[in-house]
Each structure stands twice: as structure tokens, then as C-alpha cells.
Amino acid sequence: MKDLNKIEQEVIKSLDKSLKEGDVLEIKNYYLGRKSGVITYLLKSIKDLSDGDKKKFAPQIQSLKEKTEKMIENKLKELSMSDISFKDLTLPNKKIRHGSLHPLTIVERKIVDIFTAMNFSVVDGPEIESEWYNFDALNIPEFHPAREMWDTFWIKKDYKKKDSKKRENFLMRTHTSPVQVRFMEKHKPPFQIIAPGRVFRYEATDASHEVNFHQIEGLMIGESISMANFKYIVENFLKKFFGDDITFRMRPSYFPFTEPSVEIDIKLPNSDKWLEVMGAGMVHRNVLKSAGLNHEEWQGFAFGLGVERFAMLYYGIPDIRLFYAGDLRFNRQF
């Protein structure tokens, strides 16, 4: 009973030296163990003391027990909040989650890599576009029925530029095709480019439609470019993207900025269903004229594809809305 203070100091020193949860639990068992703990033994010995000693030492022993319990509890909390791991060091550590690329970014980069390997340059254009570049320069003048093919987000109507008599309407671009006109205005052929970017459509959202999505526009202009060149390019691209077992076909279609126009369908391996993936055609002479090129000297083809469409086919994703839901469970799969 004379060593109660000594026992308390021993507990304090032992806890100060403890760096692991296991060490603290050993100290707890040594002093407070139900069968052989030092303090537990003292508590059991109280019944053998005289009445006078019981009154004197019982409160001190109980106080020592409570102090020891509190010190052990505090030490465990302290260790649990530190950076030291108290688990078995032979066990694997927790997996650290790193940031990852969005599936649309992965697919767009894959497409861009394929075309740049075929000597295509990558160019960019504004998302807020003028009516001239988005429609007029692409052979879709005002009141043309073809404008109904695009549901448009208009931004500002009848805007007059400074030092200009021309009034322009602005909109969120409905396709990446305006980039080809902008590029042709400033560069002399021959050239071959692709223009990745986001486009916007004012339409209802469902499993296959979104108000914004991504396209990649392609353009090749030269002195004797033909549909045969396009067939070679698109066949190489599709086989490099989907694999050599891909089957594709070109069927007649209509786009105001190309003539003739075609749509590209593919048939994936182990499937008998044709899927539309791309629109294309020879650049219309009116588009060349709008860009300041002589259609008697230069000709070429243009094409456009949807990144979301390719990503859905590549990964087997059934709903375009999953790309924009912000669900990390979905994004972490890629």
C-alpha cells in the first residue's frame, strides 16, 4: 500500500514510451487485467485489510484505478489521431485513390492520336459562334430549311459590331464545322486538320441526346482530293479505333455543307446490327467560296463524329447522361 504513488509513476512512464496501440494494451492488461493486473490485485486485497486501513487505502486504490483507466484512454485517442499505423505492418496498406481521366477525355485523346499519326493537325475554335460561321458560311443561309436540323441556343440577337455596318447574331455553336471555315480563311491549302470541341443543342435530354456534347471535325483540302482518299482515311481510323474486325459502309445522305454527302455505318464484331457513327462528304463549293478558296483549284472532304457516340460503343455504355452525372463510381471504372 505504500507504493501507490510509485505504481502511478510507472504507468505514466510506460505510457510515455508507448508508440503503438499494442504497447498500450499490454500496459492496460499488466495493471488492470481481470486476473493478474497489479491494480486489480490491490483492489482484491482490500477485503483483507483492517477497518481502519480500508477507510484509508480503499479510496486511494480506487482513485489510482480510475486515473490509470483515464490515462490509457487518452493515450489510445492520441495514437489513433497520429500518423502512425498501429496495424500489422505485414498487412497491405490502404489503397490510395489517384485522380483519373474522364472516359470522354480518354476516347477523345485516342481519336486525336490516331489522326495525328496520319499527319492531321489539331486546331480549335470558339464555342460562342456567330451566325455567319455556324450557318451562312456553311451554305445554310437565313430561312433555309436545313436550319431546322439544328436546335440552337441563341445568345444575342441583332448585334452590331463597332465600326461595322454588318449586324450579327450569336449562338452556342451547334457543331464544330465552323472551325473549318475559320481555318480555310487564314491558311493556304494543302492541309488536313481535325478540330475537337464541345457543341450545344437545344433539345430534350434522354439516353442518346444531351444539350451539350463533343464532336471532332475533320477536313482535308488539296488539288486532287477525292472520296477515295476519305475512304482510305476513315477505314484506317475505324480499324485502329475498334479493331481490324470492324465492318463499315458508306451510304448516301444530305448535309448542306457537303456534296455529295455520306453517312458512315459500322458493324461491330459478333453483331449483325449497323450503327451510324459519322457524317461526311466532299466540301461544297459554296463553303470553299465563303472561306475565300477557288473551288476550281481546290477540293476536299470534311467529316464529323461524336465523341460520346464512340465512347458509348467502345465501352458499351447505354446512356449518354452517365458521362455528365458526376458519379465517381462510374468515372473510376476507366
Image (tube, helix red, strand yellow):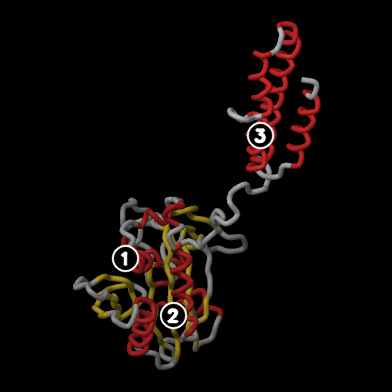
- Residue at (26% x, 80% y) in the render: 247
Q: Earlier in the sequence, mark 1 or mark 2?
A: 1
201, 164: nearer the viewer:
201
Q: Earlier in the sequence, mark 3 or mark 2?
A: 3
Is 23 placed above or below 321 here? above
In the rendered image, which residue does mark 1 sit on? 146
- Residue 323 seen by the camera: yes
Quadrant assignment, res 331: bottom left
Rendering coords of residue 220 (x, y %): 44, 84
Q: Nearer the viewer, mark 1 or mark 3?
A: 3
Is 254 displayed left or right of 175 in the figure?
Answer: left
Rendering coords of residue 188 (x, y %): 53, 86
Q: CA distance from mark 3 to mark 2?
A: 81 Å
Q: Residue furthest left?
A: 272
Rendering coords of residue 17 (x, y %): 76, 42
Is 95 displayed left or right of 42 in the figure?
Answer: left
Locate the C terminus and report the quarter of the image it occupies: bottom left
Q: CA distance from mark 1 to mark 3?
A: 87 Å
Quadrant assignment, res 267: bottom left
In the rendered image, which residue does mark 3 sit on? 30
Q: Secondary structure at mark 2?
A: strand
In the rendered image, which residue does mark 2 sit on? 219
250, 166: nearer the viewer:
250
